[in-house]
Amino acid sequence: MDTDFSIELGKEDPVLDLPWKDPTGRLAYVDLKRHPDLIFQVEEAVKFSELDEFLRMANSARSVVESAKCDTWTTTELSAEEDIYDASHKFASYIDLVFSHSDDRWSFDQHERFAKRWTELLRRAPELSASAEICVRRCFFGEEANVRDGFYFTVYINGYGSNEEDSRKSWSIGMKLAATAILQLSASPG
């Protein structure tokens, strides 16, 4: 599985506010770590069983991380770098994750180390038409006057194929591998 990680802490790079709510109030942060029964509130997890499974694993008691936000989409617009997959379709997702223990949320070194180890594990996976990119980014935890700077992960998982069904199958395998790697890393911290 093609995997890479990046550090994105520049002024123009994405950031996460946690908890978050979209401007319309229709979508908002759901604390699945402490309330796994609320997974039905995550529309994408209801629609895609693979994402449901990933979120359940990532938010389980065995995991050192928890989810903050996610999305899925399909496209036929692939970049030149994606030509290696000889595909016409991509099934893609991102999942934002934070460390569950608040002390870990402030440590850049901890995030970088986890991202590197996660990348190394995924690179050992069998070759398949899928990719993962793990990004370390800035997160603002708290609300209004009580905000603290920390970090979070965005993991992009993409599956490729000659049609939507094939690309979803590749994505599904990538999702399973990424979630399993989280649990492996959680069992052997460091």
Image: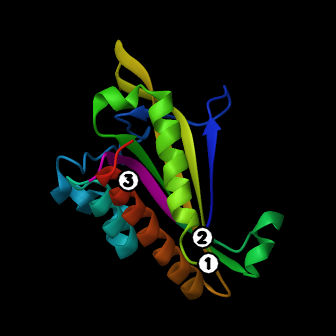
Relative image position of residue 185 (x, y in whole percent): 38, 53
Give the CA distance from mark 2 to mark 3. Answer: 17 Å
> Tag 3, which secondary structure?
helix
Q: Residue at x 51, y 83 (%)?
A: 169
Residue 34 in the image: above or below residue 79: above
Give the CA distance from mark 3 to mark 1. Answer: 21 Å
Q: Are marks 3 and 1 in contact (CB under 8 Å)?
A: no
Identify the amino acid type marked 1: Glu
Q: Main secondary structure of the magenta part?
A: strand
- Label 1: how many Cα within 10 Å (few below 14, some 14–19, many 20+): few
Q: Which residue is mark 3?
A: 185
65 falls in the magenta region: yes
Q: Which residue is mark 1?
A: 127
Q: Tag on residue 22?
A: none
User: Relative to residue 64, is residue 75 drawn left or right?
Assistant: right
Q: Residue at x 60, y 70 (%)?
A: 1
- Label 2: how many Cα within 10 Å (few below 14, some 14–19, many 20+): some
User: Relative to residue 43, is residue 136 drawn left or right?
Assistant: right
Q: Residue at x 60, y 79 (%)?
A: 128
Q: Which residue is mark 2?
A: 1
138 falls in the magenta region: no
Task: Please report the bounds of the magenta region as a residue range.
Answer: 63-72
Residue 41 in the image: above or below residue 112: below
> Tag 2, which secondary structure?
loop
User: Relative to residue 44, is residue 121 drawn left or right?
Assistant: right
Relative image position of residue 50 (x, y in whole percent): 39, 73
Identify the amino acid type marked 2: Met
Earlier in the chain: of badge 1 and badge 2, it is 2
Q: Which corner quadrant of the image does residue 110 belong to?
A: top left
Q: Residue at x 72, y 81 (%)?
A: 87
